[in-house]
Amino acid sequence: MNKRLRILILEDTASDAELMEDELKQAGLDFVSKRVATKADFTKQMEEYLPDLILADYSLPGFSGKSALNIVANQYPGIPFIFVSGALGEELAVELLKKGATDYVLKNNLLRLAPSVNRALKELAECNERKKAEEDLKKSEKELQMKSQTLEEANIALKVFY
């Protein structure tokens, strides 16, 4: 059974956050969301709400989406972070993607939001599966090494015995 997706929305305009939520609901996503607009609320909800995904405006009074991205990249790596902004130039968008943003969607093109969210979640799941496979491989290699050593010791003991 899939758990409901927890989305943290960093947005100072309630109506913009509602438009994002409506778009995701229309796309059939099962989620709950919380909206914050300040650094204090953002950091508090990152600790308490533990979001699976972050949707963030770039420009907010007293706090920027870029600052929020830095917090997430440093303290909560792996959480998908999508900018949803009114205006985001190409150079800025590239810079944000290099700093760890998953994607960006312009507010005048919210039809891209659900596909962007789905892609981000798919990439996260694939990354988690890859990490688990790597951990399983390391564990198997260690077990194989231990069994090989045990066989080698048994072989030496047999040579001494005969």
Image: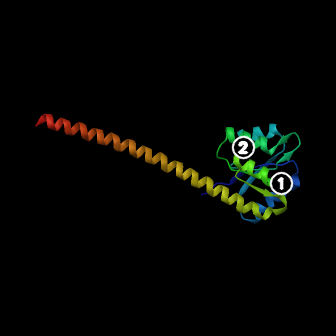
Residue visible at 76% across and 65% down? 26
Which residue in the structure is indicated by mark 2?
A: 49
Residue visible at 73% across and 40% down? 70
Q: Nearer the viewer, mark 2 or mark 1?
A: 1
Dots 2 and 1: beta carbons under 8 Å? Answer: no
Looking at the rendered structure, the kind of residue marked 2 is Tyr
Tag 1 secondary structure: helix
Residue visible at 78% across and 65% down? 111
Colouring mode (rainbow / by chain / secondary structure / one colour): rainbow
Horizontally, is 9 left or right of 123 in the view?
right
> Closer to the N terminus: mark 2 or mark 1?
1
Horizontally, is 62 left or right of 78 in the view?
right
- State which quadrant residue 147 falls in: top left
Looking at the rendered structure, the kind of residue marked 1 is Ala
Q: Position of residue 61 (x, y in %)?
A: 89, 42
Q: Position of residue 88 (x, y in %)?
A: 82, 53
- Comparing 62 with 20, the one in front is 62
- Comparing 155 with 92, the one in front is 92
Tag 2 secondary structure: loop
- State which quadrant residue 90 falls in: bottom right
Q: Quick check: 34 above or below 43? A: below
Marks 2 and 1, how far apart at CA: 17 Å
Horizontally, is 136 left or right of 107 in the view?
left
Q: Quick check: 125 above or below 69? A: below
Quadrant of image for the C terminus: top left
Which residue in the structure is indicated by mark 1?
A: 17
Residue reaching furthest to the left:
162
Quadrant of image for the N terminus: bottom right
Residue visible at 65% across and 55% down? 121
- Comparing 24 with 81, the one in front is 81
